[in-house]
Amino acid sequence: MHIADRGRREALVLFALLATAVLVFGVVTVVTGDEEPDQTFAAPILESMPTAPEMRWTADAGSLFGNEFRDAGVVVPAADDDVVIVQATQTAIGKPSALQALDPDTGRPLWDTPRIGWDDGCALSGDGQLACTRRVRVDGAVATRVSFLDPRTGTEETTALIRTAGSVTTLTGVGDGFLVETNDIKNVVIPEELSASGPPKVEYRLEVVDDPPDRQMTITKFDSQGHQPGRPSHLSIRRDRSSPMPATCSP
């Protein structure tokens, strides 16, 4: 599209109905003055649903995980057409989190018992397999443990260990497999090492340094069965010298 001369009106017409909506494909037309449309673009627009959605079912942390979790927060870290993975996290220090899989149509728990532990994040692969990560200490260093689970039963089928000391982890389902990103951040806390009897002392510190160190990132690929089809990829991210180092947290 060319820049119009002075005095020529240009209008970009976008249609969006802001209501309870679903995504459909429409056409956006660019019109310049009184000229005929010179370009059209296929673009999504919003159209209202014929009827408002109705609540299918509800579930709370207490009913899914027991009275101990009645005040826990609940999130859905992963879901597909066959299963909804629900995670409950308690606000009290030293208390474990919990996982359960639900039938998306009925809300009925699929696992005989919830999985109780320090699971950081979970993801589903394209072929419907489940993986979750947690921080563990191995030989005195913090590492990332990846558990590969049967989403229908909660059974842990295999595990893998990523030895990136002091790591913070991101887990993503990609195709029929997973990508695990680990970062060598210092002073990472292992939740199960915190005492529930008394809150730990937490120190936040912001420092500006002249020559910040590179940040090492490791990306590890797994297939949906927990096999690692290659060596991890290592990336070094250089920080801007004028940027402050991140705050650190230590118990």
Image (cartoon, rainbow, N blue to C red):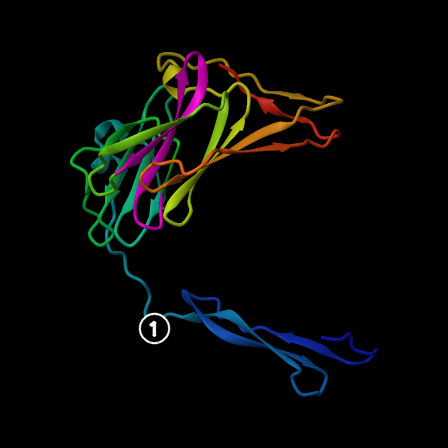
Q: Image quadrant for the N terminus?
A: bottom right
> Is 34 in the magenta?
no
Q: Residue furthest left?
A: 112
Q: Which residues are magenta?
A: 124-149
Question: Dot 1: few (<14), some (14–19), or many (≥20) neighbours within 10 Å?
Answer: few
Q: Amino acid at mark 1?
A: Pro
Q: Quadrant of residue 180?
A: top left
Total numbered badges shown on the rendered structure: 1
Classify residue 139 as left or right of residue 37.
left
> Is 131 in the magenta?
yes
Classify residue 121 as left or right of residue 58.
right
Our reading of the magenta stretch's main secondary structure is strand
Classify residue 4 as left or right of residue 107.
right
Inspect this view and state whether residue 219 appears.
yes
The residue that disc 1 covers is 50
Residue 79 x, y percent position in the rendering: 33, 48
Q: Nearer the viewer, residue 140 or 193?
A: 140
Residue at 62%, 31% (x, y): give it.
Answer: 236
